[in-house]
Image (tube, grey):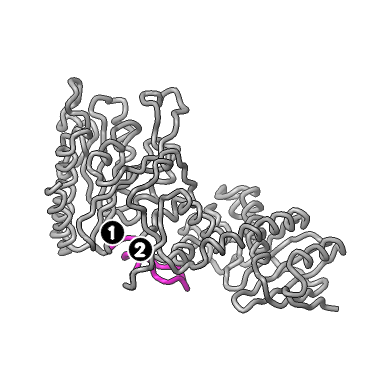
Amino acid sequence: MQIVKMVVTGPFAAGKTQFIRSISEIDVVATEAKISRPEERIKEETTVAMDFGRITVDDDLVLYLFGTPGQRRFEFMWEILSEGMLGFVVVVDSTRPETFREARLILDTFRTYAPTPYVVAANKQDMEDAWSPEDLRIALRIDPAVKVLPCVATDKESVKNVLLELLYSILETMDGEGE
Amino acid sequence: MALKGNLQDFSATQLLHLINLARKTGTLAVETPQDQARFCFREGKLIYASLDGQDDRLVSILQRAGKITEELARTIRARSDIKDDRELGVLLSNAGYVTQKDILDSVRNYVLEVVYKLFTWPEGTFRFEPNVLPVEGRITVSIDLENVIMEGSRRLREWERLQEELPNLDMALRFTDRPDARLRTINLTVEEWRVVSFINPRNTIRQIAQYNHMSDFQIRRIVYGLLQAGLVELVPPEGAEVKPPPGVPAPVGVPPIQRRPAVKRSIVQRLIDRIREL
């Protein structure tokens, strides 16, 4: 059986766990812990170890989605997670510009781990004060060749679209490299 | 006169107890069908240990302990003028790469790891050579044997239990289909994480251990924990020989392991088709 891995990363409370939960065929293994830092009290629990979800294609092929811990103190796990990934999604909470700098740092860090394709998911686009994907692109200084996609992590169709766009980008990269 | 014997007749615990009580100075060489190790003592205290087949130079000890990067280790090994571990320790410490504490802790942990292995060897021959001390230039520590004997005995009991629970390291692991709800409160250590990142029916537990420089004891303990937590299950390994990705050399003597699947265009297309169907 071939196992393919994708990583879902992004700042704290950006919606990574929800993103995986919306598409995974199994109960997402979320390893959450109570918040300890005051600035992280935006949600009651945060991911400290990992989330993972699964999409089975057939008996021979399975896609695993790994979510990274959002806090920088768990950064040591990012590199471990990034090993062998086919591509990655950077989930950004479009309503919280205070996290954009962190998103950029995470994106840069992951790019140094592996030169794999990635897309940016501009999450919470259903909220009134969400920044548009194009504004996010500018704010995060995203290369024009990289897709910044509207996303609502609670909506399965929206998550599907992000993953499909990432897979299209992977195909394009393969075509460019002659596989 | 050398002290000779067999671990079946005179166990590791008894042997260390004797060395401790008699405040012996010298080197104990132990040989089993699989392993060879040397332990050096000064006045009954353990000061050095080395395992045959494992590089015991400071540069390798620090690299395995994660105190220096692979790149720095490579640079050091390429410099033929640094032969002495003490000299290297001073250089690294002065250059700010590591602290003196890092060096001593790493050597101490390495020595302990080797000596704890001794407790898990049920058979083998030993020979104690009085007044023979470690190779010149090695950094030594001073470890009381009482604690070593206590911890070694505890590990032996744990080892026996783990051997019983997880007898075959040539099995592979896969994530369970329906993880238990208890997992929501689990925290993984860095070492557990390293194991988790290699879980794949193509990789045997032994390969995962070798790639992560883990002892049999360490890997058994971690896998046992993951099994108990319901996170993974044992499966027979898939037969296909796998290779590390380009640019990631497998360590010498370690069978190849899959760190990155060789993904073809057709695989990506199948993923696309499946996600469209969801």
The amino acid beneath tag 1 is Ile
Q: What SS does tag 1 mark?
A: strand
Image side of residue B251 versus residue A55, left or right: right
Question: Which residue is drawn at the image coordinates 42% and 50% (left, top)?
Answer: B230
Q: Which residue is mark 2?
A: B201
Residue B188 rendering spot, x and y as whole percentages: 47, 45
Q: Which residues are magenta?
A: B243-261
Main secondary-structure element of the magenta-colored stretch: loop
Q: Is residue B254 visible?
A: yes
Question: Which residue is drawn at the image coordinates 34% and 64% (left, top)?
Answer: B247
Q: Quadrant of residue B82?
A: bottom right
Q: Is residue B251 magenta?
A: yes
Q: Is residue A111 magenta?
A: no
Foreground of the two, B57 or B261: B261
Image side of residue A145 versus residue B131, left or right: left
Q: Is residue B86 visible?
A: no
Foreground of the two, A151 or B245: A151
Quarter of the picture containing the C terminus of chain A is: bottom left
Q: Please tell me the numbered disc located at residue B250.
A: none
Q: What SS does tag 2 mark?
A: loop
Chain letter for mark 1:
A
- Real-space Cα distance between discs 2 and 1? 9 Å
Question: Which residue is drawn at the image coordinates 17% and 43% (left, top)?
Answer: A160
Residue A103 rendering spot, x and y as whole percentages: 30, 35
Chain letter for mark 2:
B
Q: Which residue is mark 1?
A: A3
Local packing at callout 2 (Cα closer than 10 Å; few below 14, some 14-19, many 20+) is many
